[in-house]
Image (tube, rainbow, N blue to C red):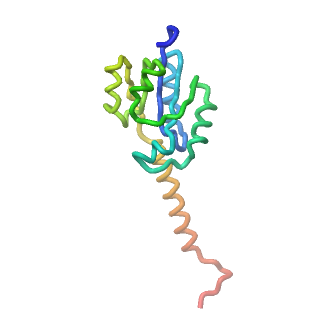
Amino acid sequence: MYNGKIVVYTSGTFDMFHSNHLKMIKYARGLGDTLIVGVSTDELVCSYKRPPVIPFEERLAILEALKYPDVVIPQHSLDHTELVKKLNIDVFVVGDDWTGKYDYLKELGVTVFYFPYGDGVSSTKIKEDILNNYLDLKQKVEKKVNPDVKVK
């Protein structure tokens, strides 16, 4: 708590920003007075999964343009112990695909919410759909006969 206000923190890669990202941020906004959103740096993301499609600076700019966050900061680590202490975080919100991972924050007096991310939209799914659509289109184009080309 800072100046009598509840400080909420949420974070993520936010690659290929979509509606589930927005839902989680909006949910986090409703849990307190001040919302801080951390955006994972490219280096951090590459330490545990494939590189993001959208560069860090652009992902940061997208989050800064939203009305819900009060502050948007770079996230350099998946260990939030020091961040919680430095920023007086009371509430931590993360997608339920990380369930259990941040329970250690409860020992610091932080309330942890694992937001039900839900099915359907995800950056991974969007990337898969783009690739599949591309491969389908490529296959159709390769099979299409050009009437101007005479085959001997």
Image: 151 above or below 105 = below
Tally of marks:
0
Which residue is depicted at the point 48% across and 14% down? 6
Hey, which quadrant is residue 98 in on the image? top left
Image: 106 above or below 148 = above
Horizontal and vertical percent for residue 144?
Answer: 58, 73
Horizontal and vertical percent for residue 122?
Answer: 47, 43
User: Residue lying furthest top in this view?
Assistant: 4
Which residue is depicted at the point 43% across and 36% down? 77
Which residue is depicted at the point 46% across and 18% down? 88
- Image quarter of the C terminus: bottom right
The answer to which of 136 and 28 lies nearer the viewer is 28
Horizontal and vertical percent for residue 35?
Answer: 53, 22
Image: 114 above or below 121 = above
The answer to which of 94 and 122 lies nearer the viewer is 94
User: Residue lying furthest bottom in this view?
Assistant: 152
Horizontal and vertical percent for residue 81?
Answer: 39, 26
Which residue is depicted at the point 49% across and 18% down? 7
